[in-house]
Amino acid sequence: MTYIVYAIYNASVDRIYIGQTQNLTERIRLHNNHEFKNGFTARFNGEWIIIYQETVETRNEALKREKQLKGYQGRQFIKKFIPR
């Protein structure tokens, strides 16, 4: 089963969130409906949109790539995809 590493952006608050999932459509719905009660994205109003995604084969690969994207260089890479 494949996994998707993704970055979403909320223009209302100029925030990025990076995560991984097997079902990106459902995950975006959860983010936008604030269903992660104590989660990072639930703290902010506004719509979260997908700005980046990539597919990997295993959860281990997804977790490793998510960690890379959350680092300084990864965040600089992701910022290139923010719509202006």
Image (tube, rainbow, N blue to C red):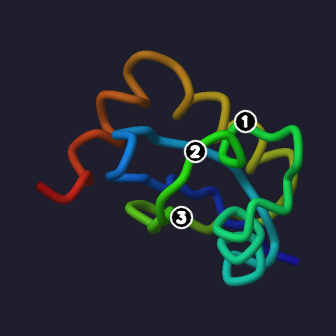
Three-letter code for the amino acid on which mark 3 is drawn: Glu
Q: Is residue 52 above or below residue 2?
A: above
Q: Is residue 1 left or right of residue 42?
A: right
User: Which residue is labeled 3 in the image?
Assistant: 54
Residue found farthest to the bottom: 25
Q: Badge 3: how crowded within 10 Å, few (<14), some, or many (20+)?
A: few
- Identify the residue shown where x is 87% and y is 54%: 59
- Separation of marks 3 and 2 at Cα, in angstroms: 25 Å
Q: Determine the image quadrant of residue 78.
A: top left
User: In this rendering, which labeled residue sits more in front, label 3 or label 2?
Assistant: 2
Quick check: 48 above or below 76? below
Does 67 appear above or below 47?
above
- The residue beneath circle 1 is 64
Q: Position of residue 51 (x, y in %)?
A: 38, 62
Label 2 sits on what residue type? Phe
Precedes in sequence: disc 1 or disc 3: 3
- Residue 41 left/right relative to 52: right
Secondary structure, mark 2, is: loop
State how far apart marks 1 and 3 are (Cα).
13 Å
Give the residue drawn at x 65%, y 72%: 28
Which residue does the numbered mark 2 point to in the structure image? 44
Q: Residues within 10 Å of mark 2 (few under 14, many from 20)?
A: some
